[in-house]
Amino acid sequence: MAIFLVDNTAEMMLQVIVNSSKINKMKEEKISAGDVVYLKSGSPALTVKSVSGNKALTSWFINNEPKTEGFELVMLTKEKSN
């Protein structure tokens, strides 16, 4: 019985380490003007025009037409989703 408890504890500790790594990565991701970002839910590449507080003004093109929209920083990532 103690073996399962030890195995479970090790698995839980590993999960905490993995989650801490993800949280630290999120904290490190600073978005600035000129960065190329994506919506976490998926989007074309967006170029950050400016950042003010917790929002970023972005621009992109659809069929050679420029588009501009503001998004909260928590919605954006520098990593392209698959």
Image (cartoon, helix red, strand yellow):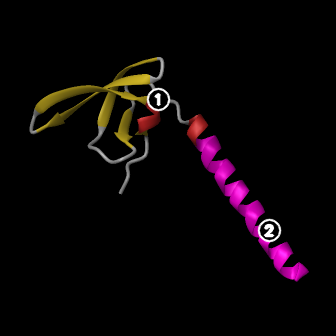
**Location of the N terminus (image quadrant):** bottom right
> Relative to residue 34, is residue 65 drawn left or right?
left
* Of the two numbered discs 2 and 1 in the rendering, the one whose residue sits closer to the viewer: 2
Identify the residue at horizontal 64%, vertical 42% (top origin). Answer: 24
Dot 2 falls on a residue whose secondary structure is helix
* Residue matched to label 1: 31
Instruction: Find residue 10 and name its label.
Output: 2
Does residue 52 show up?
Answer: yes
Question: Label 1 amino acid?
Answer: Ile
Residue count near mark 2 (Cα–Cα under 10 Å), binned few <14, some 14–19, many ≥20 = few
Instruction: Report the side of 14 relative to 51 (left or right).
Output: right
Please indicate whether residue 60 sits to the left or right of residue 32 in the image.
left
**What percent of the width, then of the height, locates residue 28?**
59, 36
Labels 2 and 1 touching (C-beta < 8 A): no
CA gap, disc 2 and disc 1? 35 Å
Q: Between residues 29 and 72, which one lies in front from this camera angle?
A: 72
Which quadrant of the structure image shows residue 60?
top left
Q: Residue furthest right?
A: 2
Q: Residue furthest front?
A: 1
- Give the answer, above or below, for where 4 lies relative to 32: below
- Considering only vertical position in the picture, is 71 above or below 2? above
From where the camera sits, is residue 33 visible? Answer: no
Residue 9: percent from the left, percent from the top? 81, 67
Q: What residue do we see at 84% from left, 74% from top? A: 5
Q: Which residue range is magenta in the image?
A: 1-25
Specify which label sits upstream in the sequence, 2 or 1. Answer: 2
Q: Is residue 8 magenta?
A: yes
Magenta region's main secondary structure? helix
| Horizontal and vertical percent position of residue 53 | 48, 17
Locate residue 11: give its quadrant: bottom right
Task: Answer above or below: position of 2 versus 28.
Answer: below
